[in-house]
Image: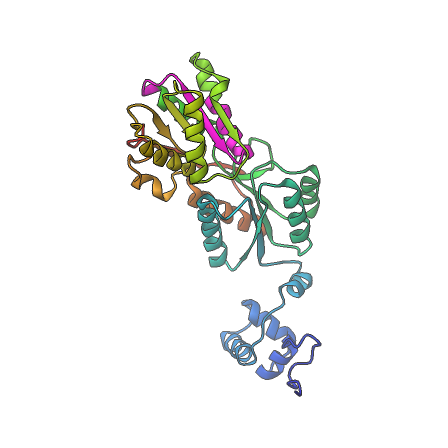
Amino acid sequence: MTPSPRRRRSTGRITLTEVAKEASVSPITASRALRGESSVSQELVERVRLAADRLGYIPDPAARALASSRSTSVAVLVPMLSNMVFVDLIEAVNDVLFEAGYQALIGITHYDPAQEEVLIRSYLSHRPAGLMVTGFDRTEASRRLIQASGVPCVHLMETTHAPEVYCVGFSQENAGASMTRHLIERGRKKIAYVAAQLDPRTMQRATGYRQVLKAEGLYDAKLEVLCPERSSVSLGARLFGELLQAHPEVDAIFFNNDDLAQGALYAAAAAQISVPEQIAIGGFNNLPAGEQMIPSLTTIDTPRKKIGELAARMVIELAQGKVVPQNSVDVGFELIVRNSS
């Protein structure tokens, strides 16, 4: 088959020069028109865009970034997308970036700092406009890469008072303490903490749990169940049964994620254990099914959408060279009391 005469590159891609010829303008005018620069008249902009559409021209973002030292991509690294927490976060980030003319490049770290380092190295080589990472737990090499790149970076889900570190999140420790205090206020004395995945934010919630119980003289290290497996409903059911078999005196359980707590509610119903009369159950993250559980699940609402929106706006402002008035934004959290406690 004879290649189209318009496809001059070895890649077969339509070039900007061919778009300019089709629109009867210079290549530099075609470039400015496609970028929407104000120096180009609306009539020329429309002519160039129509020519690009006719030819099927797709801009090369890497070439554009090299030519202008700017990019329209923002790398966003999250631990996983099998958890609604990060799905909600990514959707909010993507909506704000897209509206502002930026594209999100999603990377999944699987809670592995070494894997995150590989992704950071790869994405930074493409000179993105910005970088968004989850939390502060990463390798020293990753920190050096981010600092040396000059690419603005915003941290998600956690906050810090460190100067010149940009972040949007809330205190995981305070949230863990809030749930624990609630269970104590309900008259519970033997309160267990059951957690999976064991990422840094999970362990920060555990710190809040411990601090409150120690202050009340109620802490018992044997009532902590820390499981490295991935959080799931089925795991929650299993850990619930194992905990009560080993410690039947437990009268409340704080689960580090709602899916674990939901599994516990199913297991309690199957074992004819009354919730909250015999044992109170609390979760974390306010996942969608919690309100429909029987009984409905007490939980901590984490404002993932708000975090995503504010963080995306922050990284855009930094990418555009604007001054961000507040480098650390604490969006807070909410204890939602339902029937399980």
| Residue 127 place in picture, x, y as percent | 66, 55
State the quadrant of the C terminus: top left
Figure check: 158 above or below 64: above
Relative side of 315 to 241, left or right: right
Residue 177 visible, this angle: no
- Residue pictured at 68% horizontal, 74% vertical: 11
Residue in the foreground of this view, choosing between 326 and 229: 229
- Residue pictured at 40% horizontal, 18% vertical: 190
Magenta residues (range):
185-209
Figure check: 318 above or below 333: below
- Residue pictured at 67% horizontal, 40% vertical: 143
| Residue 296 place in picture, x, y as percent | 30, 36
| Residue 300 place in picture, x, y as percent | 39, 33
Verify whether residue 200 appears in magenta: yes
Residue in the foreground of this view, choosing between 22 and 306: 306
Q: Quadrant of residue 236?
A: top left
Residue in the foreground of this view, choosing between 186 and 136: 186
Q: Quadrant of residue 244?
A: top left
Figure check: 215 above or below 256: above
Residue furthest to the bottom:
2
Verify whether residue 226 appears in magenta: no
- Residue pictured at 61% horizontal, 58% vertical: 71
Residue in the foreground of this view, choosing between 335 and 183: 183
State the quadrant of the N terminus: bottom right
Relative side of 97 to 162, left or right: left
Figure check: 20 above or below 300: below
Which colouring convention does the figure follow? rainbow
Residue 63 visible, this angle: yes
Number of numbered discs on residues: 0
